[in-house]
Image: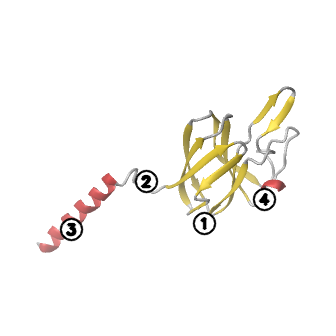
Amino acid sequence: LLLLVGLVLTGCDDDDDDDGGGDGGGATTVNVELNEFVITADPDSAPAGDVTFEVENIGEETHEFVIVQTDLDADELRAAEDGSFDEEGEGVTVVDEIEDIESGATADVTANLEAGAYLLICNLVEEEDGETESHFAEGMHTGFTVE
């Protein structure tokens, strides 16, 4: 009887913890800020599994957020004529992305990530006053590690 009461109480404790613990999904949360022309991720690594990127555009321009799995450094990625990163290039896999995040907006994406090296990139290209501006070419990318 004591064993049965102990199991019931233990089960109740577990349920209480789950209800107060947020999503209960076990995803690691990474806070990301987008700005001209910088991406910061806190933390800059996560354990393998579900990772939720909570992205905030604190800049004045529209940006996007692309998760790329690759062992290449950003300067080794193949670029298109307009300076954007070639998302179909050899040695890279685009895992997921959020397009067109307006200034002041927030968005999130959850991806199931395997251990390895990743880049977080803004790959927008704008044309203004006859000039092409690639956010990627301007340095809007950062490394991210999944352990």
User: Taking 111 as reference, is 45 above or below it?
Assistant: below
What residue would you read off at disc 3? Answer: 7
Q: Earlier in the sequence, mark 1 or mark 4?
A: 4
Task: Tell me where residue 102 appears, x and y as whole percent.
Answer: 62, 33
Q: Secondary structure at mark 3?
A: helix
What residue would you read off at disc 1? Answer: 147
- Eye-nearest disc, 3 or 2: 2
Task: Tell me where residue 66 appears, x and y as whole percent.
Answer: 67, 45
The Cα atoms of the two marked residues, 3 and 4, are separated by 51 Å
Give yes or no for contact between labels 3 and 4 (Cβ–Cβ under 8 Å): no
The Cα atoms of the two marked residues, 3 and 2, are separated by 24 Å
What residue would you read off at disc 4? Answer: 72
Q: Earlier in the sequence, mark 3 or mark 1?
A: 3
Task: Tell me where residue 141 appears, x and y as whole percent.
Answer: 72, 50
The Cα atoms of the two marked residues, 1 and 4, are separated by 17 Å
Q: Earlier in the sequence, mark 3 or mark 4?
A: 3
Q: Earlier in the sequence, mark 2 or mark 4?
A: 2
Q: Secondary structure at mark 2?
A: loop
Q: Earlier in the sequence, mark 2 or mark 1?
A: 2
Q: Amino acid at mark 4?
A: Leu
Q: How many marks?
A: 4
What residue would you read off at disc 2? Answer: 25
